[in-house]
Amino acid sequence: MRLDIITLFPNMLSSFFEESILKRAQNKQLVDVHFHDLHDYSQNSYGSVDDYAYGGGAGMVIGIEPVALCIDDLKKERAYDEIIYTAPDGEMLTQSTSNRLSMMQNIMILCGHYKGIDERIREHFITMELSIGDYVLTGGELAAAVISDSVIRLIPGVLSDETSALSDSFQNNLISPPVYTRPVEFRGWRVPDVLLSGNHAKIDQWRYDRSVERTQQRRPHLLDLE
C-alpha cells in the first residue's frame, strides 16, 4: 500500500510512524508512507496557505490553490482508491471502514486545520470524509494517524500473528472478551477455570458469550448492526 498524507505539520506525524507496528510494516515494505508539506505549494511570498473566510467570521480557512496543486501533483504519479479528508463532520471511522481501506493500493489523506478547507476542495477532490469522534482537535494530524494505524495493522503480514486482528474488538460487531495471563491466581483473584480446561469448544463459547455480554453493556448499538 502507498499512503500519502498532506499536512501543514509533517513533523507531528513522522515520529508516530517510526515506532512499533507502523515502523515494522514499512521495514517489511508492506506500506510506503509519504508526507507532503502543504506550505510547499503556497502561492504567495509568505508561504501561507490560509486566508480569511468570505462573509467574515472568526478563524482562517485553508485555500483551494495549494491543496489542488498538491493533489494534482500526486495524481500525476498514480491513481488513488480514496482521497480522504479528516473532518469533524465526516463519516465516523469504524472497523468495517478500516477493513475495506486495508485492501486498497493507494490512499491519500488530507489533514484538516483551522475552520476548515475551502468547500470546493471537498466538492471536487475529496472522495471520503472521516471523523474519529464528535469533538474538535487542533488539526487533522492525530485523526490521520489514527486512521492510518487502524488500516495498516490489518494489511496481511504486518502483525506477527495474522489471526490476531480477526479477534479484535468491533470485528463482527462485538467487543473482545476479557483476557488473562500468568499467574493463575493473584491476591486471591483467579483466572476463570474454563480458560484452563483445554476444552477449546467450551473456551470459544465462553469467549463469545462474554463478548456479547460486554457489547450489550457497553456498545449495545453494535448488536443492531448484525
Image (cartoon, rainbow, N blue to C red):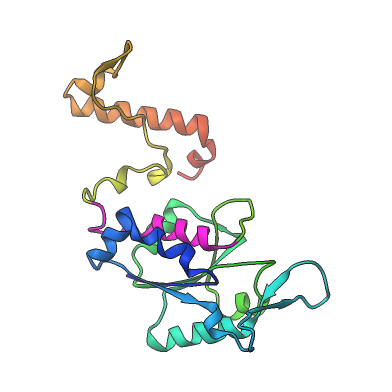
On screen, residue 138 versus residue 173, left or right, reads right
x and y percent of residue 178 in the render? 36, 29
The magenta-colored residue range is 139-159
Q: Is 224 drawn above or below residue 39 in the view shown? A: above
Residue 182 place in picture, x, y as percent: 23, 24
- Whether residue 153 is visible: no
Q: Quadrant of residue 99?
A: bottom left
**Looking at the image, which residue is at 48% across and 39% down?**
223
Residue 71 part of the magenta-drawn span? no
Q: Is residue 160 above or below residue 48?
A: above
Question: Which residue is more in the foreground, 109 or 38?
Answer: 38
**Residue under the point 26% across and 31% down:** 204
Tell me the quarter of the image containing the C terminus. Answer: top left
Q: Is residue 87 visible?
A: yes
State which quarter of the image contains the N terminus.
Answer: bottom left
206 sits left or right of 62 in the view: left
Indicate whether residue 152 is drawn in magenta.
Answer: yes
Check the image and report above or below for 148 versus 79: above
Q: Nearer the viewer, residue 79 or 30?
A: 30
Picture residue at 51% right of the left edge, 33% below the top: 218
Choose between 219 and 135: the one closer to the eye: 135
The answer to which quarter of the image holds residue 189 is top left
State the residue at coordinates (69%, 73%).
61
